[in-house]
Structure formats: C-alpha cells, structure tokens
C-alpha cells in the first residue's frame, strides 16, 4: 500500500484523511489511542509533543508514524513522508534510514512491514497536491516551523530556486493567544485552548466575547514571516500560496505584505496528498 504521511509537530496526517495530535505518553492512561508498539504501551494523540525539530531517530516520530500505518489497516507499506525544507538536503537519508529501522514492528499484535521510504521536502509536497502551473512562492505554516519556497515553473516542471525555514509556528501563537486572554479576563486557560479560541472564538460564562483585541498579537506573530517574504521573495510580482494548519487563520495577516496571497485547497492535508501523489509516480 502506498501512503503519504505528514508527521507534523502539531498533527499527524495522511492522504487517506486520518489526523491526530502529534503527542504521546507512556502507559495506559485514559484518553487518546491505546497502542502497544514492540511490547511498549503508549497513549497516542494525548500527552506531550516534542520541542526537538529533528525527526530522525526520535521515539515520537516512530510512534506517530506506526500509529498512522496501523489505522490504515494494511500489512505492508511504501511510505513518502517529509522534512522542513531547510533540513531536507542534510536529513533526507538520515530520516529514511531511521524509519527503516522499525520496518518490521508489531503494533497492537499486528506485524507492519515497511518495504520502502522516500522523503520529500515540505512546501514542495503541498504544491504537488494541486494542479497549479505557474511560478509561485509557497508558505507552509505548521506547528513549529514555517517553510517558504520559491518555485519557478518552466518547461512543464517546477524548480526550487530559493527557500527558508523559520522556527515560527502555530504552537507558539496558541500560547501567545492563551496568555493574552488570561491577562485580559484574569483567567488561567491552558496553552492548548489558544487553538480553539483562534479558530472558534472565545466564550466566557456562556457569553461570546469580542476577540479583536487579539489582532495585534496575531499580527506581531506574523511579522517575521512577512519580513522574510518581503526581503527575499517576489511577493509583488508572483502569487503567494499558503498551506498547513495556519494557512486559513493567518491568511488575512499575511495579505498585508503579500496582496496576491491564496490558500491551497484542503491546506492542512496538502503535504500528505502531495507526498502520496509523488509516491504514485515513483512506485508505479
């Protein structure tokens, strides 16, 4: 079975529509998905994520990837996954070899065989997922990082001519939002609730609140992204397309520096879908 898996710092997604939080804890606590991997018990989708941006030789990467494969129900897989664009050249083979080390793992009593792994750069995966045929800058706003790539379309193919990875992601924004709400309303909401506030608004004591006071917080968070785009990319002469979990909520703020900005369809799954599309080509 061919599969594209995007093991993100906030969520793990695949091209078949599975998505769960990129977090785990050992043991058999209540909540999350109970997984036993090579004799060790985990709760997946709850607990702690990671602050380590290196995905290779990482226990969390192993647990998240094998959980996703288990959810898809097959016994053998050819996988395409990804790395932040600035890590791709140096970490591609390291990640590939680290994943192949657990190619015959036992997950909840079922043997899962990984026959091959390929690694593709984030941003490029998202662009491959759509039928887009013109030069553009892709901005992939993820949980821990924001990847930016300039893709020039010539002779029927894209060439990556410039790229950046900023360690600015949605997880830090959620923390900033939670802090701003706590300060304004004298609350003690946890960091994870910042995501719900950004996407769904704020309700206190059953009353919806005006969240416009959060706009300066979000604008300030987007400032490094906008600065990088303006200084290093042709944002006034080429389209800018957003993808990743932050694409929709941050679009209006990125638009201030890139007026022609748009969002890739199904943006949160776009890398996983692009990985799968590439897998269909190389494993044809």
Image (tube, helix red, strand yellow):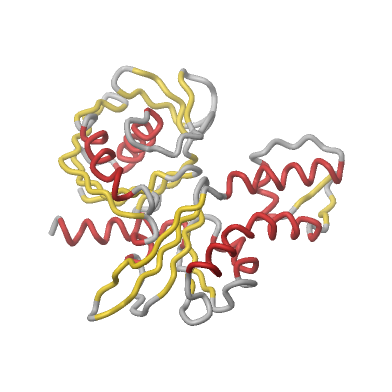
Residue 66 appears in which quarter of the rendering? top left
Q: Is residue 31 left or right of residue 44?
A: right
Asked whether residue 190 is in view, the answer is yes
Q: Where is residue 149 in the image (x, y as percent from the top left)?
A: 41, 64
Q: In this view, does 126 lie above or below 256?
A: above
Asked whether 138 or 86 is in front, the reply is 86
Asked whether residue 195 is in view, the answer is no
Q: Where is residue 259 in the image (x, y as percent from the top left)?
A: 59, 78
Identity of the residue drawn at 50% across and 43% down: 10
Q: Is residue 100 above or below residue 109?
A: below
Q: Is residue 62 above or below residue 181?
A: above
Q: Position of residue 169 (x, y in %)?
A: 55, 49
Identity of the residue drawn at 32% across and 50% down: 88
The extreme left residue here reads: 284
Identity of the residue drawn at 53% across and 30% down: 48
Asked whether 225 or 182 is in front, the reply is 225
Asked whether 266 or 185 is in front, the reply is 185
The image quadrant where one finds the C terminus is bottom left
Q: Where is residue 198 in the image (x, y as percent from the top left)?
A: 67, 53
């Amino acid at each position: 079975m061919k599969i594209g898996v995007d093991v993100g710092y906030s969520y793990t997604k695949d091209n078949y529509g599975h998505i769960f939080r990129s977090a785990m804890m050992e043991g058999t606590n209540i909540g999350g998905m109970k997984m036993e991997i090579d004799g060790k018990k985990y709760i997946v989708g709850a607990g702690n994520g990671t602050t380590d941006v290196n995905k290779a030789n990482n226990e969390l990467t192993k647990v998240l990837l094998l959980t996703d494969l288990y959810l898809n129900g097959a016994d053998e897989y050819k996988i395409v996954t990804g790395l932040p664009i600035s890590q791709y050249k140096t970490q591609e083979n390291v990640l590939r070899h680290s994943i192949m080390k657990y190619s015959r793992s036992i997950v909840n009593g079922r043997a899962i065989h990984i026959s091959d792994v390929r690694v593709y750069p984030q941003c490029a995966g998202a662009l491959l997922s759509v039928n887009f045929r013109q030069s553009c800058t892709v901005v992939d706003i993820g949980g821990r990082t924001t990847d930016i790539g300039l893709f020039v379309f010539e002779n029927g193919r894209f060439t990556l001519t410039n790229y950046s990875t900023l360690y600015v992601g949605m997880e830090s924004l959620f923390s900033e939002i939670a802090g701003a709400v706590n300060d304004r309303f004298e609350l003690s909401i946890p960091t994870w609730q910042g995501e719900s506030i950004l996407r769904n608004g704020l309700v206190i004591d059953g009353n919806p609140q005006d969240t416009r006071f959060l706009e300066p917080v979000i604008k300030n968070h987007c400032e490094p992204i906008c600065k990088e785009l303006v200084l290093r990319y042709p944002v006034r002469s080429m389209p800018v397309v957003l993808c990743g979990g932050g694409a929709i909520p941050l679009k209006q703020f990125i638009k201030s520096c890139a007026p022609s900005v748009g969002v890739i369809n199904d943006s949160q799954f776009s890398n996983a879908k692009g990985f799968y599309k590439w897998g269909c080509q190389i494993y044809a």
